[in-house]
Structure formats: structure tokens, C-alpha cells
Image: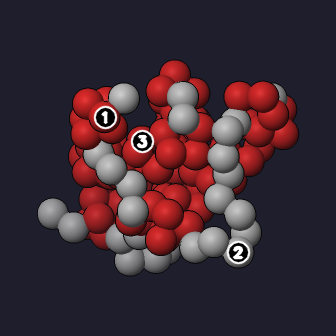
Amino acid sequence: MTDSELISKYQTGDTTSFETLLRRHQNALYTFLLRLTADRDRAEDLFQETFLHVLNALPKYKEQGISRHWLSRIANNVARDAGRRDPARLNRVIPDNESVHTAASSTTRPDTAAVQS
């Protein structure tokens, strides 16, 4: 099932479709946040906060599917907001002139990152 189909199902009340979307995008998004923060606990917190934002946006979402760029932009904004609240906990935020899509696509998987640590 495509992201667009899952979003449509979610918009009509099928909450399990959101769980499928979450599972589909969780590795890439978590890894993206882990690269931003270099802190597993912080990345997990920001991941949850990001998906709360996504959950709130889906009822009115009109695009076709969920793009990695869209998710990464939400995650980056959540991380920036968190960095403003607690600058010591945010190690790296993607500069405005760096492509969020490029940064997200160059991430390693969480299981690979854990082995490399």
C-alpha cells in the first residue's frame, strides 16, 4: 500500500494506517535525528515529537504520499525548536543552506550506527 493510500485511510478513521506509515519511515527519520543530535535519548525524544507533529498534520495533508524531505523538514524544525529551548543538548542542526534531503539520504541506519559507536 502506498503512503497516499495509507494517509487516505488514516483520514477516514483507520488509525492502524498511521502505525504502518510510522514503521515505514522510522529508521530513516530516527537516523536523521541521531545525526543532528549525536545523542540516542535526545533523538528518540525528537522522533516522538516529530511524529506527533506529523500526526497532527495528516488530517489536512493534501500531497501525494509522505516524502522523506517533508518528514526531514518537520524533524529539523522540531530539533531547532528543541535547540532553542535547550541549546546544550543539540549538537548539530543542518544549516539553512544545506539540503535537508541530502542530509537525510546520507544517514546510516540506527543498527549500523550503534555498531560503529
| Lower sequence index among marks 3 and 1 | 3
Q: From the top left corner, tell me how far across and down residue 27 is, in percent.
A: 31, 45
The numbered disc on residue 22 is none
Residue at horizontal 36%, vertical 70%? 65
Q: Nearer the viewer, residue 31 or 2?
A: 31
**Residue 52 falls left or right of residue 63:** right
Alpha carbons under labels 1 and 2: distance apart? 28 Å
**What residue is pinned by disc 1?**
116
Q: From the top left corner, tell me how far across and down residue 64 is, in percent.
A: 38, 77
Q: Residues within 10 Å of mark 1 (few under 14, many from 20)?
A: few
**Residue 1 falls left or right of residue 5:** left
Secondary element at image label 1: helix
Give the foreground label among 3 and 1: 1
Say what amino acid the circle numbered 1 marks. Answer: Gln
Secondary element at image label 2: loop
The answer to whether one can see residue 105 in this image is yes
Secondary element at image label 3: helix
The numbered disc on residue 30 is 3
Say what amino acid the circle numbered 3 marks. Answer: Tyr
Residue at horizontal 78%, vertical 28%? 88
The answer to whether one can see residue 61 in this image is no
Q: From the top left corner, tell me how far across and down residue 30 is, in percent.
A: 42, 42
Q: Residues within 10 Å of mark 2 (few under 14, many from 20)?
A: few
Alpha carbons under labels 3 and 1: distance apart? 16 Å
Marker count (numbered)? 3
Q: Nearer the viewer, residue 91 or 56?
A: 91
| Rendered image quadrant of residue 99 | bottom right
Q: Nearer the viewer, residue 27 or 1?
A: 27
**What residue is pinned by disc 2?**
97
Looking at the rendering, in which quadrant would you find the N terminus?
A: bottom left
Say what amino acid the circle numbered 2 marks. Answer: Asn
**Residue 73 falls left or right of residue 97:** left
